[in-house]
Amino acid sequence: MKKILPFMALLATSTMVLADDLAKYTVALQKIASPATKVVAVADTPIKGIKEILVDVGRGSEVMYISADGKYLVNGSLFDIENRVDLTDAKKTEMRKDVMKAFGKGDTIDFFPEEGKMTSHVTVFTDIDCGYCRKLHAEIKGYNDLGIGVSYLFFPRAGVQSASFDKAVNVWCAKDQQEAMTLSKAGETVEPKTCDNPIEAHYKAGVTAGVSGTPALILDDGTLMPGYLPPAQLKQRMDMLAMRK
């Protein structure tokens, strides 16, 4: 018991310090941002006196840096020159990987190859009204034929109170989601329906993942590939990345 008590005391102290940091940096950010802005995580960086903070901006989370005293904010990338590593991008990649793990079967609309023929997988943040999203979906068979499984999450670029958001809800609530997705991507009108749906959660996840446009392709390891890629080019990129590991 004598060995446990000091550890418990240290743990309690660490928790208190962390809570104090979250509160301190939240107050600091709210001076220049929305009152709803909240710091949800704090970590050290290789630079003395600079902290990494994960900021909840209401629509999702963003990585920023702040001086330990909370007086100076750095909004940009932290780059390790000696090792040639973008530390901010590495952090965001891990975040994207965690975001993808949060969506399992039943949380996405999937277009997969025949059973046993899927060799790779990509999650695509899509907008019903996005031209290149429609082009990508028009070639969905090409991706599947190359063994690439595609899982869709919705990212209505106009936000959660928009016509694109409503169209996404209509597709999600359709009896046959895949058919509704294909029709909507072809410019057809899908019967308006409402139901419990994850579209807003999809959108917020996209913000956290760093999605700024559609289509946005995210591999299972968290790698972000913004923009449309034809089936053969995507397959080539995925194979090259796999060889580097």
Image (spheres, helix red, strand yellow):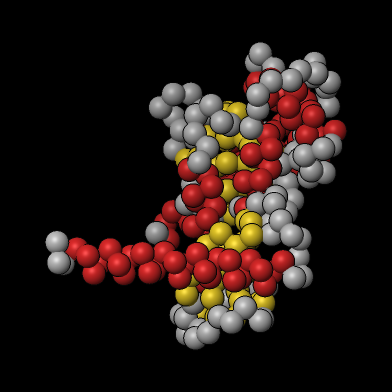
Q: Percent x, y for residue 120?
A: 47, 40
- Residue 104 in sight in this render: yes
Q: Percent x, y for residue 31?
A: 75, 70
Residue 186 falls left or right of residue 26: right
Give above or below for 60 relative to 38.
above
The residue lying at 65 percent from left, 27 percent from top is 197
- The tally of labels here is 0
Residue farthest toward the top in the current orientation of the protein: 175
The residue lying at 66 percent from left, 81 percent from top is 71
Residue 26 falls left or right of residue 97: right
Give above or below for 156 relative to 114.
below
Give above or below for 187 relative to 100.
above
Q: Percent x, y for residue 189?
A: 84, 20
The residue lying at 69 percent from left, 59 percent from top is 37
Residue 227 falls left or right of residue 108: right
Q: Percent x, y for residue 56?
A: 64, 56
Q: Quadrant of residue 155?
A: top right
Q: Quadrant of residue 4?
A: bottom left
Residue 165 falls left or right of residue 105: right
Q: Which quadrant does the N terminus fall into?
A: bottom left
Q: Which quadrant does the C terminus fall into?
A: bottom left
Give above or below for 143 relative to 52.
above
- Residue 233 in sight in this render: no
The residue lying at 36 percent from left, 64 percent from top is 12
